[in-house]
Image (cartoon, rainbow, N blue to C red):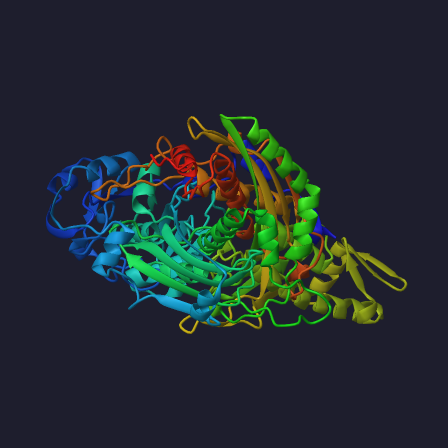
Amino acid sequence: MSASASLPHDAARQHVSGSARYVDDIPTPQGTLHLAFGLSSCAAGQIKSVDLDAVRACPGVHLVLEAKDLPHANDVSPSAHDEPLLADGRVHYAGQPIFLVVAESHHLARRAARLATVEIAAEPAILTIEQALAAESRFEDGPRIYTKGNPTGAMDDAIHRLKGQINLGGQEHFYLEGQAALALAGDHDDVVIHSSTQHPTEIQHKVAEALNIALHAVRVEVRRMGGGFGGKESQGNALAVACALAALRTGRPCKMRYDRDDDFIITGKRHDCQIAYNVGFDDSGRIQALEFTHYFRCGWALDLSLPVADRAMLHADNAYDLPHVKITSHRLKTNTQSATAFRGFGGPQGMVGIERVMDHIAHSLSCDPAAVRRRNYYPEMTSKPAARPAITPYQMEVTDFILGEMTGSLLQRCDYHARKAEIAHWNAGNALLKRGIAFSPVKFGISFTLTHLNQAGALVQIYTDGSVLINHGGTEMGQGLFQKLTQVAGRSLGAQQAVIRASATDTSKVPNTSATAASSGADLNGMAVQAACATLIGRLKDHVAQQYAVKPDEITFAEGQITAPGLSLTWQEVIASAYEARISLSATGFYKTPEIAWDRIKGAGRPFLYFAYGAAVTEVVIDTLTGENRILRCDILHDCGESLNPALDIGQIEGGFVQGAGWLTTEELVWDAAGHLKTHAPATYKIPACSDRPDVFNVDLWPGQNTQKTVYRSKAVGEPPFMHGISAFLALSNAVAACGPQYPDLQAPATSEEVFSAIARARGSAL
């Protein structure tokens, strides 16, 4: 059936030919105006004066707006209403928009914005985690704490103890297409927004608030994005609101896009953080007690920091059954860009913490790190109940654990133990180059932790020629969601794949949608599409049964053929007949995720419907003279349940690994002492290139089905593969450990400079 076939992405040809139309490619109407923000050069302070006379006098400038000029809500926050569109008397980070320029061209607007004279009384900026802690600058009244068992007592009784800390850098989204929006004013004070966003409904809400109009007067359309990775979940609000305000003020179409350096400077990143740990364990490496303290640098506004930091806590266990554990999380407010969603949404940070602990334990005991990990696994899912319940630190029972079997299969497939021995032998004979190998597992929870977001709608329409058009709340950002959902529709309707298309995501067709995030795009929208198709098939079967005197349960729809005893019809024949019989050929579908409930204050409940699993083994080599390194090989075994499209899923897994490895190895964000982001362009910020992909890259899908009733028993595949990149970081640590007897204490990102420093630590000769 088409729902599990490796069909090409619906826009594959357009992507590779360069003809795919993104927001910046949409032909603009005659008279379109272009927007740019005037940005603060100061990280913290009071605005004393803003002189915009030179900006307004610049030829081609039509409008210049400050906060005081906005007619209604000056707010683009996705959560706490603490993020103004334009600074309202104070600036909170270097790069904050202070005013808006509307001009005849993009370049003219940017040039005009530089003519402003802004006087700011600078104040001491809080930039680092240490400064935020000292100033008690934080979100929420204090730290959030999850506790399981008796970690204090168990720690006192532990045979072995270790303490440590790992620093994790942030990450720029570096999507192919930058932030962009186009607004077209209507004739009833309504507006159409084309936005490069993962969350059309939130764009609709923020524009409606800014214009003080009803939601039905704002239509948001998204055909595709050139990548999102969480960076377009909330960060597109400012552009859409600015364009809508300008369009209604001028009566002309208005467009805004960030240049790459502006995108870097204005928008939020992945949260950087520090994770301190204190662990007690036995002679085998089995953890007896564990204490984590997370310090998250959230930036100047709340954005999505609370659920991101929450999810880091929810994944602090990863694959490991921790009997006694305490997790403390600080959410710190700083004068930097407001950190935001990024693929994994805090999960990667939490997982790196526990994986560092496992590596540190293995090093201290001179044990195989893979063996230590397996000794700490949750009980394997079997037909028999476990001797004791497998309970997470947040009180959710793990009933679908399959990593034990997956791990054994992967280690055998990639010849892990023989390669590890060979690498040890090779390292013993090579002084300058050292190789490393590492294994890491993934257990990632799937669902939005904000329960009400776990819902989706869909609209499926069949036309009289038999063609089918589906619309749903999910957005296409290159991941292949549209292709998967047309396959779901094809299988559900029994129609040929060629007659089915998905139309652009549109708030006027499917309302009240959730963001395409949390790896829930296919899970939620696929089930909604399936529900709509089930309604249509019910109507069509009833029609055929009545028309041809057969029983409904005897009728089969498959691959464009409708059959029953003594009956054979084509899809087109049945649709034409149904239309003539005045059968409705349009239906909506709705889905809400069952069985989930989460209390984030108590840190208890069932935040996830299920877990997605995976495991990776990565091999690297380092140059001990420079710290330069390469990924040589990666083997991944990943659990997609009954994959909706294996080819697309493998692509997601490959891309996730490379992006995760980039975060932990090459991508470094650097701010100076004044709070200016210095790595704000491709020249200074190093994302992985094609040459950084391992020469040997083996990706296999684990055969099996989701135990939960998801769309055709598939599993999410957007975020979980990102964490496979952790194995690259661990492999670098393993290679560095071969340089000397001390624990290398490698920090992230493990740039060449950091690897070089860690080599010195391993040798006991700190630089």
Frontmost residue, 748 versus 371: 371
Q: Position of residue 752 (x, y in %)?
A: 41, 32
Kindly identify the residue that appears in the image at 58 percent across and 53 percent down.
372
Where 676 sits versus 451, above or below? above
Kindly identify the residue that appears in the image at 33 percent across and 65 percent down.
143
Q: Position of residue 454 (x, y in %)?
A: 51, 66
User: Viewed as shown, does residue 652 lie left or right of 139?
Assistant: right
Hey, which quadrant is residue 308 in on the image? bottom left
Q: Position of residue 81 (x, y in %)?
A: 29, 63
User: Viewed as shown, does residue 380 lie left or right of 253?
Assistant: right
Hey, which quadrant is residue 429 in on the image? top right
Numbered disc total: 0
The answer to whether residue 237 is seen in the rendering is yes
Kindly identify the residue that appears in the image at 64 percent across and 53 percent down.
639
The answer to whether residue 235 is seen in the rendering is no
Q: Residue furthest right?
A: 566
Frontmost residue, 600 versus 384: 384
Where 453 sits versus 728, above or below? below
Frontmost residue, 285 versus 518: 285
User: Viewed as shown, does residue 3 lie left or right of 743?
Assistant: right
Q: Quadrant of the image for the C terminus?
A: top left
Q: Position of residue 484 (x, y in %)?
A: 62, 51
Where 156 sits versus 117, above or below? below
Kindly identify the residue that appears in the image at 54 percent across and 57 percent down.
521
